[in-house]
Image: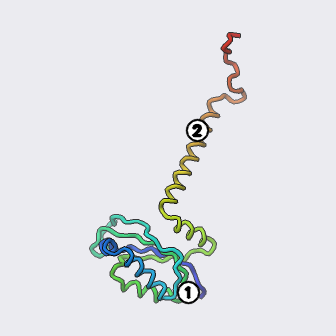
Amino acid sequence: MGENVYDAMFILDAGRYARDPEGVSGQLSKIIVEGGGKILVSRLWEERRLAFPIKGQRKGVYWLIYFRLNGEKLSALRQRLRLNDTILRMLFVRVDPRIVDTLVAHALAGPAAMAAERRAAEAREKQAEAQAEGEEAVPAGRPAGAGRPSASGA
């Protein structure tokens, strides 16, 4: 089995993360690297209230990591991560090689870039709507201003 790129989403204990953010996130990366992986991106996704308590916790920190790893080593890595008390839940998804670069670039851009992209898309949509409304105001087959009396009264 060759090397694959994986998308790992972790839900971390919010209390432990609040006390030592760098230590908790660094611990995840360290375990992956020690397991033979190469980190592509590691970043905070968001902190939010959980839909239901997990291990007695009502809030969780979502942490996203893209990493490259030989597929044969994945089960050993999962076992090692299960022993970490900071991790409430985790999910690994193998990423299709055709979209790895796009996903990694998107993850590196972070939330600010995603918000800017969303605002730009909304602005383009509003502009398209305004243009469509402007075109609807002029009846089809008739140039703007045709059939109206001129200001000179002719």
Measured from the top left, where is residue 118 in percent x and y?
52, 54
Against 130, residue 37 (above or below) is: below
Query: Looking at the image, is mark 2 or mark 1 earlier in the sequence?
Result: 1
Against 107, residue 93 (above or below) is: below
Measured from the top left, where is residue 131 in percent x and y?
62, 38
The residue shown at (67%, 18%) is: 148
Drawn side of residue 62 relative to residue 124, left or right:
left
Drawn side of residue 32 relative to residue 153, left or right:
left
> What amino acid type should be assigned to the residue bearing mark 2?
Ala
Please give the label number shown on residue 70: 1
Instruction: Check disc 1 and report its element: helix, strand or loop.
Output: strand
The residue shown at (52%, 84%) is: 37
On the rendered image, what quadrant is the C terminus found in?
top right
Q: Nearer the viewer, residue 22 or 76?
A: 22
Q: Residue furthest left?
A: 56
Specify how the rendered protein is coloured.
rainbow
Against 87, residue 142 (above or below) is: above
Sort mark 2 into few (<14), some (14-19) or many (20+) by Cα contacts within 10 Å.
Answer: few
> What amino acid type should be assigned to the residue bearing mark 1?
Asn
Instruction: Check disc 2 and report its element: helix, strand or loop.
Output: helix
Measured from the top left, where is residue 98 in percent x and y?
63, 72
The residue shown at (65%, 29%) is: 138
Determine which residue is flagged by label 2.
Answer: 130
Distance, label 2 to label 1, CA atoms, is 52 Å
Classify residue 90 by image quadrant.
bottom left
Q: Nearer the viewer, residue 2 or 27?
A: 27
Q: Nearer the viewer, residue 28 or 73?
A: 28
